[in-house]
Amino acid sequence: MSVDRKKLGALLKWYIQEVGKDLIAVIVVNREGLVIDAITGGSDKSVDEEIVGGVSALVEPVLTRITKEFSSGAFGTGTFDTEDYRLIFCEAGPEAVFVTVLDAVAMVDPVFPYAYLTAEKIARIFDGRTVSPVIPKIITQSSGTIERKKGALQKIKVQSGEYAYKLILGGDGGVGKTSMVHRFVEDAFQTDYKSTIGTSIMKKECEFEGLSSKVRFVIWDLAGQSQFKRVRQTYVENAEAGIVVYDVTRKDTFDNIDIWHKEIKEASPTISLVLVGNKIDLVDDRNVTTEEGQALAQKLGLTYIETSAKDGTNIQDAFKMLALQMIKRFVVTEEV
């Protein structure tokens, strides 16, 4: 199996950073349990061979059970608990499995969205597709849905196979909202989009093979100009998901995010939002740092990610991340 190990290593290190102190190790294995790559938590350069060796011994029989009980090979995502560890298994394409090893007392619920997104990125690396190693900070709560059951293999799934949500995009005019939507829906980019008047509506599905479910977004691209503020309130009402966008080259669009956040929350108080810093391809023109974006997201209690609609960087991840936030509340486990 040919794989870009440099890119894979960068992705795993980013994952470790975001999951934090409860993470013991991450291991990428093939379906026979052979280790392809592994990194222990808190280590940038070395792998604790004792930890990896011990966990690998646990991984192989669990993979055998997965293969035996799900002959189609579409096990998806699951957990397995031992005396010392909590393991999350995520299929990463047809040949590999991504294993997260957590401390025995860790909560699996807040880690699951990170693990799932990372497994999808690993699959793209194996396929030779373009992928960013960045793992965004995901705002999630420890719901306790995934309970600890020592010695039990639990499959993680969603209660129903399909969900539909109204999704709005907010942000000043010219920040790239329309370009983001077209990149997501059509995987296309144009340089001559006209300013959105009122709103533009498109539809797109996010599929989650490992969860046997999909999320359908009805996307409302809101006009950013101030003269449309009154009509925007009507469009925002009853929206369940949203992306608030600023242009990293224009500080004023970043400064106005507080206003957009307040406007959206007043119209739809329970909406789930993601903050996006767009146009990161314009490196030399950048006026808002990643750290500033992260700080604002933390202040507002939002997940944060940086994108480029022009080259497609992280566009799919931004929408998929929001979709995971939406369906996470419907995640259940099934002992197998």
Image (tube, helix red, strand yellow):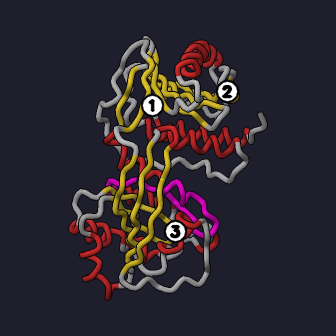
Please provide percent x and percent y for residue 334. Answer: 38, 25
Residue 142 spot, x, y in % from top left = 31, 35
Q: Residue 143, image x and y in percent? A: 29, 35
Mark 3 or mark 2, which has the lower sequence index?
2
Name the residue carrying label 3: 180
Q: Nearer the viewer, mark 1 or mark 3?
A: 3
Query: Which of the numbered marks, if any, corresponds to residue 168?
Result: none
Given this view, does label 1 or label 2 mark the residue nearer the observer? 2
Mark carried by residue 30: 2
Label 1: which secondary element: loop
Compared with 155, 168 (above or below) is below
Element marked by disc 3: helix
Q: Quadrant of the C terminus?
A: top left
Residue 316 occupies quadrant:
bottom right
Q: In this picture, is 315 found above or below 215? A: below
Q: Residue at x 43, y 68 (%)?
A: 245
User: What residue do we see at 65% from left, 31% from top?
Assistant: 96
For residue 267: magenta? no
Residue 66 falls in which quadrant of the image?
top right
Tell me how far mark 3 sits from mark 2, CA to CA: 35 Å
Q: Which residues are magenta?
A: 299-318
204 or 52: nearer the eye?
Answer: 204
In the image, residue 336 above or below residue 3: above
Q: CA distance from mark 1 to mark 3?
A: 34 Å
Estimate the spatial distance between the alpha carbons at disc 1 and disc 2, rounded to whole Å: 26 Å
Mark number displayed over residue 21: 1
* Marks 1,2: beta carbons within 8 A: no
